[in-house]
């Protein structure tokens, strides 16, 4: 059913149908009511912008996946062990409430322009941002203009911070990293390395701090040569592993995420070392493949489905109640013990 067919049934011109759905004032009430009755009867769905101008609320939520690493691509996003399950959870939660998800990838700074347009033209009722740097200025700008936004992993600097005016869902990265490192310490390890994630992200910084705190509390000296930078990709973990093993061989490694753990494992195997006989390893995220590695990977579980559900449910609540709904969630994490670590 299109606008021309609606016009014929209602006995008006196509332009009159357009004026009605766009809520123009120069249409007689009798004509307007007749057109709207036909629109309702035949379940006519006009263009999104027209529906918005007609006062109808969008039942679409935008999911903006930010991944600006040089090696990022569409295909890597769809197979991502982090973005893919989160996306599935967002879609599932929204669909159960008759909302749809519009997914947009942000691989370059200029891609934020398209994201902003979706808010400005009311294509979406709200948006979820995941994967962004801490204190991302483009997200800040959208929030400042009063749009409904949920952000995954973002620090708040003070009470006046713009990010206080959105829905924040943060995992306890510090606590998870502390628990992971402390677990290795309790197994008797003192020479523990850390493969650091992207330091532009809240998670990268906090996981490093949690690692350092656990060592300090145990009276173990923090050695900079045991801290190697990565960027959350498997390849960066592999390169970090090669670099680490060329310096010295630790008894244990805590990697900032599971993808880097897989890269590190490859480097360890190429060095003819065994896990956990020679080196114990702990990851972070608990991606699906972690349990199927040989040996199965001990890791920190992030409840991505719960985080996705919180984001979607809060945005729907804010949209349907048409209010400025702010919230700040801190999600506890769980250490999942498998077979990649041993006591020494």
Image (tube, helix red, strand yellow):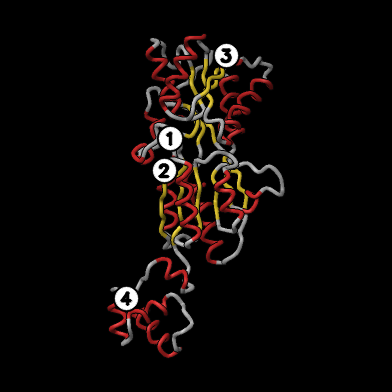
Q: Earlier in the sequence, mark 4 or mark 2?
A: 4
Assess disc 2: are there few (<14), some (14-19) or many (≥20) residues with their C-alpha within 10 Å of its C-alpha.
Answer: some
**In front of the other: label 2 or label 3?**
3
Q: Which residue occupies the foreground of this view, 95 or 69?
A: 69
Q: Earlier in the sequence, mark 2 or mark 1?
A: 2
Percent position (x, y) of residue 19?
41, 78
Is residue 310 left or right of 9 when viewed as pictured? right
CA–CA distance in space, label 3 to label 1: 28 Å
Q: Which residue occupies the foreground of this view, 334 or 95?
A: 95
Percent position (x, y) of residue 123?
44, 61
CA–CA distance in space, label 2 to label 3: 34 Å
CA–CA distance in space, label 4 to label 3: 68 Å
Tag shown at residue 3: 4
CA–CA distance in space, label 4 to label 2: 39 Å
Assess disc 1: are there few (<14), some (14-19) or many (≥20) residues with their C-alpha within 10 Å of its C-alpha.
Answer: many
Tag shown at residue 162: none
CA–CA distance in space, label 1 to label 4: 48 Å
Q: Residue drawn 42% across and 15% down?
A: 268
Element on which disc 3 rests = helix
- Contact between marks 3 and 1 (CB within 8 A): the answer is no
Q: How many marks?
A: 4
Task: Provide the residue designation for mark 3.
Answer: 225
Q: Earlier in the sequence, mark 2 or mark 3?
A: 2
Tag shown at residue 287: 1
- Contact between marks 2 and 1 (CB within 8 A): the answer is yes
**In front of the other: label 4 or label 2?**
4
Task: Provide the residue designation for mark 2.
Answer: 85
Q: Residue drawn 41% across and 59% down?
A: 100
């Amino acid at each position: 059913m299109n606008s021309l067919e609606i016009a014929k049934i209602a006995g008006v011109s196509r332009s009159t149908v357009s004026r009605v759905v766009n809520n123009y004032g120069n249409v007689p009430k009798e004509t307007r009511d007749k057109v709207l009755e036909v629109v309702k009867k035949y379940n006519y769905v006009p263009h999104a912008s027209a529906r918005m101008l007609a006062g109808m609320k969008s039942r679409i939520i935008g999911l903006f996946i930010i991944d600006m690493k040089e090696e990022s691509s569409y295909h890597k996003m769809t197979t991502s062990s982090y973005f893919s399950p989160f996306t599935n959870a967002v879609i599932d939660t929204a669909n159960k409430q008759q909302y749809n998800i519009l997914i947009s990838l942000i691989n370059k700074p200029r891609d934020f322009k398209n994201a902003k347009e979706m808010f400005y033209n009311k294509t979406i009722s709200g948006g979820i941002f995941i994967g962004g740097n801490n204190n991302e200025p483009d997200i800040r700008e959208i929030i400042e203009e009063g749009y409904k936004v949920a952000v995954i992993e973002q620090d708040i600097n003070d009470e006046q911070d713009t990010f206080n005016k959105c829905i924040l869902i943060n995992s306890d990265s510090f606590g998870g990293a502390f628990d992971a490192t402390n677990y290795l310490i309790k197994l008797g390890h003192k020479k523990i390395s850390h493969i650091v994630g992207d330091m532009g992200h809240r998670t990268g910084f906090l996981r490093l701090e949690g690692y350092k705190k656990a060592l300090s509390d145990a009276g173990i000296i923090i050695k900079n040569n045991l801290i190697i930078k990565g960027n959350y990709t498997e390849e960066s973990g592999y390169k970090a592993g090669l670099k680490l093993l060329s310096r010295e061989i630790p008894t244990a490694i805590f990697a900032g995420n599971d993808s880097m753990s897989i890269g590190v494992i490859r480097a360890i195997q190429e060095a003819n070392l065994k896990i956990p006989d020679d080196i114990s390893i702990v990851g972070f995220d608990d991606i699906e493949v972690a349990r199927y590695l040989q040996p199965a990977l001990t890791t920190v579980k992030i409840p991505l489905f719960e985080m996705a559900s919180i984001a979607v449910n809060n945005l729907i609540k804010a949209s349907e109640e048409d209010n400025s709904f702010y919230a700040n969630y801190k999600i506890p994490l769980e250490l999942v013990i498998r077979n990649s670590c041993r006591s020494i």
